[in-house]
Image (cartoon, rainbow, N blue to C red):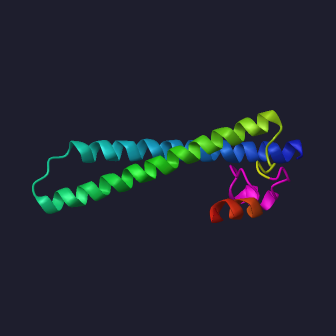
Amino acid sequence: MEKEKLDSFRAMLVELKKRLSSDYEKTLESASEEFGSEVPDMNDEATRTMSRRLLMSIGDKSLDTLRQIEEALERIDDGEYGICAECEEPIPEGRLELVPHAIFCVRCQEQIEKK
């Protein structure tokens, strides 16, 4: 892949990382506030429990995506960015523009999801 394209994808990944890091921190703050609240009745407790689970789920997904972004940045540094980890064929740039931290090409991703 051309250096200009790699630089563009690096900038995209760094921006996405900043945004997700900020969102993740906000999620953790919200979860902390929820855990520290007093509960007046059982219905409120059920609602707060569901809210906590949702916030933690969002946090887990954000953390996983942040890890994938870090790995994508490492692949850029190693000269392996844009290569499918399964079939070792180039990942189309259109896919990388939509999911810059993609590890697999569409075909391999679909096969993995079917399993």
Residue 41 in which image quadrant: bottom left
Whether residue 84 is visible to the viewer of this picture, yes or no, is: yes
Q: Nearer the viewer, residue 115 or 91?
A: 115
Residue in the image at 67% along x and 59% along y = 112
Left/right placement of residue 22 relative to residue 74 reads left
Which percent across, then down, holds residue 1? 88, 47
* 2 shown above or below 40: above
Q: Hey, which residue is sitting farthest front in the picture? A: 115
Left/right placement of residue 95 relative to residue 4 reads left
Residue 67 in which image quadrant: top right
Left/right placement of residue 98 relative to residue 67 reads right
Q: Is residue 11 magenta?
A: no
Quarter that holds the C terminus: bottom right
Tell me the magenta residue range: 87-105
* 41 shown above or below 67: below
Which percent across, then down, holds residue 18? 57, 42
Residue in the image at 25% along x and 44% along y = 35
Which percent across, then down, holds residue 24? 46, 44
The count of marks equals 0
Which percent across, then down, holds residue 92? 82, 59
Q: Hey, which residue is sitting farthest right in the picture? A: 2
Whether residue 19 is visible to the viewer of this picture, yes or no, is: no
Q: Hey, which residue is sitting farthest left in the picture? A: 40
Examine the residues drawn in magenta and state their main secondary structure. Answer: loop
Residue in the image at 75% along x and 47% along y = 9
Q: Is residue 100 magenta?
A: yes
Residue in the image at 55% along x and 46% along y = 64
